[in-house]
Image (tube, helix red, strand yellow):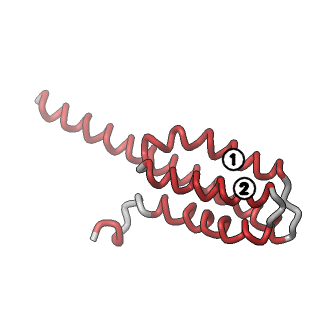
Amino acid sequence: MKIVASILISGALLIGFSTFELCYVDKTFDTFHEGLTSIYQKTEDCSATHEDGTALQLFWEEKKKTLYLWLPHTLIDQVDYHLGEALGYLYQGNFEDSLPKFELLLDMAETIPRAYKLLPENIF
């Protein structure tokens, strides 16, 4: 009886933590994607400012600390690298060169969380 109860409790905890992780990662990357979309549009219009970039960078710096618990460090490091390059171009006023970096980051913000969902393409 105790063994069955332990198995059920362990299973419930596993399902609970997995659900929380999926929701947290999805929500974080959805918000990050919204920020990237906003700064991308402003960059296309050549109206992005240093403050826009700083706000996005501060959001990412805060959230990545928790994402390290759920995602491989290499993925987070790649986002860091490309975000740093994109913002570096933006801070120099080089809007044209920052656009491809923001496009890459937008793609990463969509594909990273999808890679960890329970989808048929991730299982088979």
In what quadrant of the picture does the C terminus appear? bottom left
Q: Nearer the viewer, residue 7 or 101?
A: 101
At a point 58% along the width and 68% down the height, the residue shown is: 107
Q: Secondary structure at mark 1?
A: helix
Which residue does the numbered mark 1 point to in the structure image? 57
Q: Quadrant of residue 49?
A: bottom right
Label 1 Cα neighbours within 10 Å, binned few <14 / some 14-19 / many ≥20: some
At a point 29% along the width and 66% down the height, the residue shown is: 123
* Disc marking residue 111: none
At a point 69% along the width and 47% down the height, the residue shown is: 57
In what quadrant of the picture does the N terminus appear? top left
Residue 13 locus on image (x, y percent):
32, 37
- In the drawing, does residue 13 fall left or right of residue 83? left
- Choose mark 1 or mark 2, whichever is in front: 2
At a point 57% along the width and 61% down the height, the residue shown is: 109
**What is the distance, in whole Å, between disc 1 and disc 2 at their CAs?**
8 Å
Which residue does the numbered mark 2 point to in the structure image? 87
Q: Nearer the viewer, residue 4 or 72?
A: 72
Residue 2 locus on image (x, y percent):
13, 27
Q: Earlier in the sequence, mark 1 or mark 2?
A: 1
Q: Quadrant of residue 44?
A: bottom right
Q: Is residue 86 above or below residue 6?
A: below
Label 2 Cα neighbours within 10 Å, binned few <14 / some 14-19 / many ≥20: many
C-beta proximity under 8 Å, tags 1 and 2: yes
Q: Is residue 121 above or below residue 28?
A: below
Q: Secondary structure at mark 2?
A: helix
Three-letter amino acid code at disc 2? Leu
Q: Is residue 80 above or below residue 46?
A: above
Three-letter amino acid code at disc 1? Gln
Q: Is residue 23 above or below residue 1?
A: below
Q: Nearer the viewer, residue 32 or 44?
A: 44
